Image (cartoon, rainbow, N blue to C red):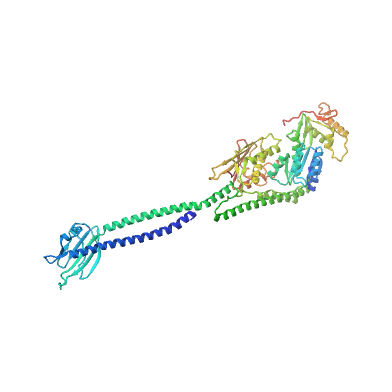
């Protein structure tokens, strides 16, 4: 029961089916009662005319005059049969010649009954009535009149009626369900719109739900929007606070470090300063890294990369650097601008540090990963590269493969943490340029 | 080399001044953005270290105004906000490199020297002109592989001349690079120092590494060897 439509459909079609079932039962019973009465009337009228037509015969028995006989009684196997019996005599209607109907036992005077019997394939209803003439003290002349009528025409009629009934009801049910489905389509349209808009917010294509929802949903929509805006504000404030905290802790640390005695081995204070620096660099930064927020506008990768390129060319002006950006215009990252800048900045800085002269940043959207669009970012250089056994190690905090190159050794660990925060992945390989290749897979579009 | 340090934290500022002086720099200091901007515009500097989080006038604004005033010496920024957005902003404003707080002094020094070399058109810490090799990291000079014993002032003058080898540098400029503004300036001292340098570099008087251009100043005349 995960769909409202299905719930509605089931909850409507069950009573509907019950209603129609009961209706069919009632109509069927009514129709049968009607046809039974018709049949009874036919039997009664045949009985009366048979009794009226019966005349004493020379042999002491009774029989109707042939001209007074109903044509159906005269035709063999017509479906209407009659018999007049006494203890001594018996008269069969000509229609009974081959059917061989068993009309049951003789009745005593005044008795009458209606029974059913089978004659071969045919089912018949039999009405019998016993009549005694007054001048018959021994009861020898008590006559049992029987009329039988084949049930098959009635059954056929009933069957046809039922077929028609079922046909009509099925048609009606289908019509009702189709109407219901169409109505639901219409009624649930705002819900589907809300679902679509939430999806768009998730994908970063819009920042909030639109207006114009029906009264029952407008509250939900506006509450959701309030929640989205509030959440974005809260996270922004949280990040700001953490950023300021890190910032305001660093200057005192710098003061403390510069106050340490020079040219002496790092004492406990120096070690603790390094530890605190590391905590600020790593933990606070990681806490301040945003991750994707609902309703965040996507960030254009090319737009973020261009100023970084300019800045790095400036910093590495002493190197004859070719820093190439291969980023299609449609490449967008879903997440925080600051996070993307950190990712690209750290990777590019690392590549510039190690390269001989070539660094390449390639971004592309990758549709292979389970339908959802992924952003693929590669940073390559023509430096010495990273050997397979060092690859896992360089992603750890504070590890530098070459201690002579300045840096805290935090950049790559930071990149990995941020990528993981976004549910992405990071891998290190070799570049055709000759050096290392860092590959990031991130949510994007 | 004359360097300006703009830093609001007194301990950091004093420490930087002390250690930069020890490393052979002539150091000016400023406590806030306004003071820093004034010093940066008025003094004949080779390089400036500017903290981004300054009172009165933010570091970024100081850098922008300096560049707007066509001051072209390299600028190193100190930043406690160690994120790329701020670094990019600083570099876009006109800074040349950055060091994140809390820093090791050695890192600041290395970046400063690299900036100075770059400003002089050198890409390596070793400046080589003919047989003369000056190592800016070790502050050591050798001629034809023989190490020279130079005084601090002699080294500073030679470094300044060699960093800008081929350019004419006035006596006033050299004097200002040697002394803080508080000292009395005496151009005779420069003549004496240059004379001593010439004798140490070129005892046989065959190389003639330092030219005197009458009324204009000095020029390091040996061609740069940029292959190393």
Q: Quadrant of residue A24?
A: bottom left
Residue B173 horizontal/vertical position (percent) = 83, 34
Q: Position of residue A188 (x, y in %)?
A: 50, 53
* B87 horizontally vs B180: left or right: left
Give percent across and percent down for residue A330: 59, 40
Relative vertical location of residue A94 with respect to residue B125 in this rendering, above or below: below
| Residue A327 shows in the view | yes
Q: Between residues A9 and B168, which one lies in front from this camera angle? A: A9
Between residues A72 and B61, which one lies in front from this camera angle?
A: A72
Residue displayed at 38% across by 60% down:
A23
Residue at the left extreme? A58
Q: Which residue is most to the top?
A: B206
Is residue A330 left or right of A349 when viewed as pictured?
left
Where, by quadrant of the figure, is residue A157 drawn? bottom left
- Residue nearest the viewer, comparing B42 with A308: B42
| Percent position of residue B195, x then y | 86, 31
């Amino acid at each position: 029961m995960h769909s409202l439509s299905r719930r509605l459909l089931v909850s409507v079609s069950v009573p509907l089916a019950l209603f129609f079932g009961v209706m069919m039962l009632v109509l069927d019973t009514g129709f049968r009662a009607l046809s039974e009465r018709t049949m009874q009337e036919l039997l009664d009228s045949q009985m009366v005319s048979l009794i009226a037509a019966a005349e004493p015969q020379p042999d002491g028995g009774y029989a109707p005059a042939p001209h007074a006989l109903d044509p159906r009684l005269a035709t063999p196997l017509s479906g209407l049969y009659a018999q007049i019996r006494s203890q001594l005599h018996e008269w069969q209607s000509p229609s009974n010649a081959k059917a061989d109907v068993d009309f049951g036992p003789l009745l005593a005077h005044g008795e009458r009954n209606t029974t059913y019997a089978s004659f071969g394939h045919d089912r018949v209803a039999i009405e019998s009535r016993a009549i005694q003439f007054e001048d018959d003290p021994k009861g020898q002349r008590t006559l049992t009149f029987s009329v039988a009528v084949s049930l098959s025409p009635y059954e056929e009629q009933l069957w046809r009626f039922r077929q028609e009934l079922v046909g009509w009801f099925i048609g009606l049910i289908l019509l009702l369900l189709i109407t219901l489905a169409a109505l639901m389509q219409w009624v649930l349209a705002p819900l589907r719109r809300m679902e679509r808009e939430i999806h768009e917010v998730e994908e970063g294509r819009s920042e909030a739900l639109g207006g114009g929802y029906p009264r029952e949903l407008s509250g939900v929509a506006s509450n959701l929007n309030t929640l989205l805006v509030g959440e974005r504000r809260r996270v922004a404030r949280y990040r700001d606070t953490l950023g300021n905290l890190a910032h305001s802790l660093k200057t005192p640390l710098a003061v403390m470090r510069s106050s340490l005695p020079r040219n002496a081995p790092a004492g406990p204070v120096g070690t603790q300063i390094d530890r605190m620096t590391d905590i600020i660099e790593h933990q606070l930064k990681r806490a301040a890294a945003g991750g994707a927020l609902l309703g965040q506008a996507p960030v254009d990768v090319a737009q973020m990369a261009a100023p970084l390129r300019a800045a790095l060319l400036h910093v590495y002006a002493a190197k004859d650097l070719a820093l190439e950006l291969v980023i299609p215009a449609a490449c967008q990252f879903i997440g925080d601008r600051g996070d993307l800048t950190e990712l690209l900045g750290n990777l590019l800085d690392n590549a510039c540090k190690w390269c001989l002269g070539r660094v390449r940043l390639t971004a592309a959207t990758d549709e292979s990963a389970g339908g959802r669009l992924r952003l693929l970012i590669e940073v390559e250089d023509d430096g010495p590269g990273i050997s397979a056994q060092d690859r896992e190690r360089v992603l750890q905090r504070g590890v530098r493969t070459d201690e002579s190159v300045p840096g805290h050794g935090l950049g790559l660990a930071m990149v990995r943490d941020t990528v993981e925060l976004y549910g992405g992945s990071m891998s290190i390989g070799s570049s055709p340029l000759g050096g290392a290749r860092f590959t990031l897979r991130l949510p994007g579009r | 080399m004359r360097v300006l340090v703009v830093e609001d934290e007194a301990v950091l500022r004093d420490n930087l001044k002390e250690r930069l002086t020890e490393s052979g720099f002539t150091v000016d200091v400023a406590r806030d953005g306004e003071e820093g901007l004034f010093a940066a515009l008025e003094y004949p500097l080779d390089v400036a270290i500017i903290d981004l989080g300054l009172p009165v006038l933010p570091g970024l604004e100081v850098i922008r105004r300096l560049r707007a005033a066509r001051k072209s010496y390299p600028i190193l920024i100190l930043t406690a906000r160690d994120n790329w957005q701020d670094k990019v902003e600083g570099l876009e404003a006109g800074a040349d490199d950055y060091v994140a707080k809390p820093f090791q002094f050695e890192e600041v020094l290395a970046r400063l020297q690299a900036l100075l070399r770059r400003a002089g058109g050198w890409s390596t810490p070793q400046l080589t002109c003919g047989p003369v090799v000056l190592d800016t990291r070790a502050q050591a000079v050798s001629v034809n592989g023989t190490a020279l014993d130079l005084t601090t002032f002699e080294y500073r003058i030679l470094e300044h001349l060699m960093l800008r080898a081929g350019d004419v540098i006035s006596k006033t400029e050299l004097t200002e690079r040697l002394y803080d503004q508080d000292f009395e300036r005496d151009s005779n001292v420069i003549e004496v120092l240059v004379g001593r340098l010439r004798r140490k570099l070129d005892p046989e008087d065959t190389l003639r590494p330092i030219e005197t251009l009458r009324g204009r100043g000095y020029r390091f005349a040996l061609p740069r060897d940029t292959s190393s």
